[in-house]
Image (cartoon, rainbow, N blue to C red):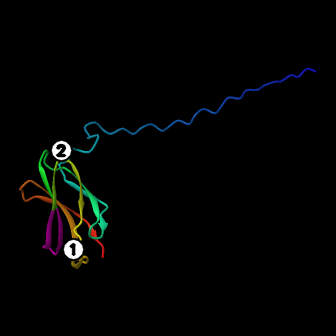
Amino acid sequence: MTVTVTATATAAAPPATAPPVDALPSGVPTGPAASAARVLLASPDTGRGGTRTVLTGQGFPPDTVIRVSFVVKTEGLEYQHRDLRDTKSDSAGAFSVEVSIPSDLEDYQDKNTYLRAQAGTGTKYSDTVFNLLP
């Protein structure tokens, strides 16, 4: 018995060509400018008293003591200000620290509650919302 096989090759369709890139005009910045804006985030940012959260900050002065506080305020008035702990920013002005939300503030659950980071003894600080649950 003799078997003859005939193979036929077909050319694959050429790959689709991407459209040309519309380049930026010369002189236009190619990325975001470096910013000294402070960023402060809590994770988690919601919980009851006693919740442990990690506060992360960027844009603070480098190698500086950072005081972390829990603040309750409304209409610009602070009802409570509780210092939680100190940490230190790194050489780039960033830090990450775990804190525990005070557990004796149940009377303030309907107020605006924040975690605050303040560098050194200056008056400039940054707040991020922490939603205190009943």
Where residue 77 appears, x then y in whole percent?
12, 74
The one of 16 and 107 positioned closer to us in this rendering: 107
> Does 82 lie within the magenta span?
yes
| Disc 2/disc 1 C-alpha distance (Å) | 32 Å
Furthest toward the right, the residue is 1
Q: Is residue 43 left or right of residue 102?
A: right
Q: x, y percentage for residue 112? A: 22, 72
The residue shown at (8%, 53%) is: 120
> Mark 2 near mark 1, Cβ–Cβ under 8 Å?
no
Bin the neighbour count of mark 1 within 10 Å (Cα to Cα): few under 14, some 14-19, many 20 and up: few
Q: Secondary structure at mark 2?
A: loop
The prevailing secondary structure element of the residues shown in magenta is: strand
Q: In the image, is 80 to the left or to the right of 130?
A: left
| Outermost residue, top side | 2
Amino acid type at image mark 2 = Asp
Q: Which residues are magenta?
A: 69-83
Residue 133 vertical placement versus 21 (above, below): below
Residue shown at 16% from the left, 42% from the top: 91
Residue 55 picture quarter = bottom left
Q: Position of residue 130 (x, y in %)?
A: 26, 66
Mark 2, residue position: 90
| Amino acid at the residue labelled 1 | Asp
